[in-house]
């Protein structure tokens, strides 16, 4: 009788666990990696730079990690790096960070333009997780000060990341401390173009930018991949920004930008992100976004759902 009860309980437990949603969205503050705030969904992983990185002149731009699996990878990357010095800039089988941000917008970071000059912020100062479930993450970052045309502003950005969605949502607010620049302010988001030969398209009909470039655009990552596996052929990174009602799609300072006139203190919403051209859902043998056309179609599908 005890055996029957035990197996009955075991069966019920298995059914209950199997009905729980699979965790495909995850994010956290990463103090062991210089205060990064990192997050991921099934398509890609990302991070913003925090206070400990201030001496290295970081930006408020977005770093992107390539994944070739919908499985969660960030904790594996950081654990192996911190404990065993295994670099996550190298493709060991589940993905890698081959993207160079430096002091740029990276893959969809906020950008301000005044009188044709591009302004980019520094590292965030505080973070807060607002919501975290297996399929949805909402977090907020605050930046104390950013100089825009010599006038100080604070920046607040709230990121929403959902399972099964190729881009993240960003809600951005820039608040002046005192006076405003004399010139009109344009606010938006940018894709830094690096020095590689990429395929860039401005899709005016859906207010979007799509870009495909080599997945290894960080010289340090190139050296590490050559050292570990003598392999620097790691395909391409697809990137995109969608900004509904953008008034300007243009390139400034090697950065493809989606912009619109901005009233300080109000909220601007846009979507950003990317994916590796070798990403699969772990069941198909062919990558989902093997070509720039495949990626452009995915961005178009998402854009129709946002309107």
Image (tube, rainbow, N blue to C red):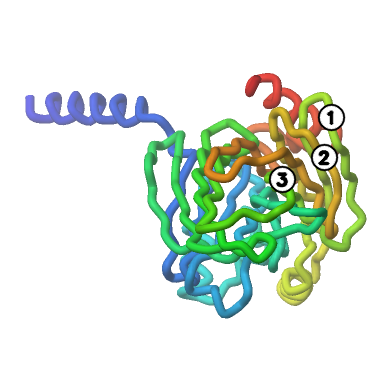
Which residue position holds label 3?
Answer: 186
* Residue at 52%, 50% in the rendered image: 175
Which residue position holds label 2?
Answer: 249
Q: Is residue 229 left or right of residue 291?
A: left
Residue 240: where, in percent of width, then height?
Answer: 74, 41
Secondary structure, mark 1, is helix
Secondary structure, mark 2, is strand
Among numbered discs 2 and 1, the one appearing first in the sequence: 1
Residue 188 image-quadrant placement: top right
* Residue at 24%, 24% in the rendered image: 12
Q: Is residue 225 above or below residue 156?
A: below
Q: Is residue 256 above or below residue 16?
A: below
* Residue at 79%, 39% in the rendered image: 209
**Mark 3 Cα shell of 10 Å, populated few (<14), some (14-19), many (≥20):** many
Which residue position holds label 1?
Answer: 204
Which quarter of the image is occupied by the C terminus?
Answer: top right
Secondary structure, mark 3, is strand
Q: Are marks 2 and 1 in contact (CB under 8 Å)?
A: yes
Q: Is residue 266 left or right of residue 301?
A: left
**Mark 2 Cα shell of 10 Å, populated few (<14), some (14-19), many (≥20):** many
Extreme residue toward the right, this view? 197
Among numbered discs 1 and 3, the one appearing first in the sequence: 3
Marks 3 and 2 sit apart, C-alpha to C-alpha, by: 11 Å
């Amino acid at each position: 009788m005890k055996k029957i009860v035990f197996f009955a309980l075991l069966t019920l437990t298995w059914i209950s666990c199997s009905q729980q949603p699979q965790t495909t969205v995850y994010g956290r503050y990463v103090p062991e990696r210089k205060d990064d705030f990192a997050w991921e969904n099934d398509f890609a992983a990302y991070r913003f730079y925090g206070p400990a990185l201030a001496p290295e002149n970081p930006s408020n731009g977005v770093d992107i990690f390539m994944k070739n699996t919908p499985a969660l990878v960030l904790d594996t990357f950081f654990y192996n790096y911190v404990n065993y010095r295994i670099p996550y800039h190298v493709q060991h089988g589940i993905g890698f960070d081959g993207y160079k941000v430096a002091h740029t917008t990276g893959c969809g970071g906020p950008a301000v333009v005044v009188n044709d000059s591009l302004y980019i912020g520094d590292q965030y100062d505080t973070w807060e997780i607002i919501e975290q479930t297996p399929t949805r993450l909402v977090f907020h970052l605050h930046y104390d000060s950013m100089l825009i045309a010599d006038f100080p502003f604070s920046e607040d950005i709230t990121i929403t990341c959902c399972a099964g969605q190729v881009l993240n949502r960003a809600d951005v607010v820039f608040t002046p401390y005192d006076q405003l620049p004399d010139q009109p302010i344009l606010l938006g988001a940018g894709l830094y173009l690096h020095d590689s030969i990429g395929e860039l398209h401005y899709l005016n009909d859906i207010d979007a930018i799509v870009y495909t470039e080599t997945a290894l655009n960080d010289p340090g990552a190139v050296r590490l991949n050559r050292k570990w596996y003598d392999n620097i052929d790691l395909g391409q990174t697809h990137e995109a920004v969608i900004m509904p009602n953008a008034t300007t799609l243009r390139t400034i300072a090697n950065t493809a930008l989606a912009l619109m006139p901005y009233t300080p203190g109000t909220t601007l919403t846009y979507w950003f992100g990317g994916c590796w051209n070798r990403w699969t859902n772990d069941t198909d043998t062919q990558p989902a976004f093997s070509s720039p056309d495949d990626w452009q179609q995915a961005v178009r599908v998402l854009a129709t759902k946002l309107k």
